[in-house]
Image (cartoon, grey):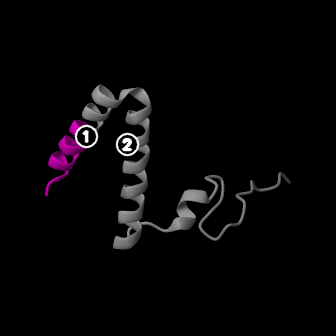
Amino acid sequence: MSLSLVGLAVGIALGFAGYFGGFGAFVIVAALGLIGFLVGRYLEGDLDPGDLFRSRDRDRDDRPRTRPRPR
């Protein structure tokens, strides 16, 4: 299934949730969709759980980035 069809299906589901269930249902469907997406990426091996919680100011080896000292 192409990504455009997946996006269409998600948009339709969110539209129905928002129309029939209100904003609360829209938020619940969107949150559960995001969780499902992340679980699917993890099961496929495309997502490392540490990537979600790692700070952006650190390198891959978890050392803080430092600037060279002035001489």
Is 64 placed above or below 13 here?
below
Q: Classify residue 40 as left or right of residue 52.
A: left
Magenta span includes 10: yes
Amino acid type indicated by mark 2: Val
| Range covered by the magenta-colored residues | 1-12
**The quadrant where residue 31 appears:** top left
Real-space CA distance between mark 1 and mark 2, rounded to the nearest whole angstrom: 8 Å
Q: Which mark is residue 1?
A: none
Is 35 placed above or below 9 here?
below
Is label 1 in a helix, a strand or a loop?
helix
Is 3 placed above or below 40 here?
above
Is label 2 in a helix, a strand or a loop?
helix
Q: Residue furthest right?
A: 71
Decide which of 30, 2 is in the foreground and name it: 30
Is 23 placed above or below 57 here?
above
Q: To which residue does mark 2 refer?
A: 29
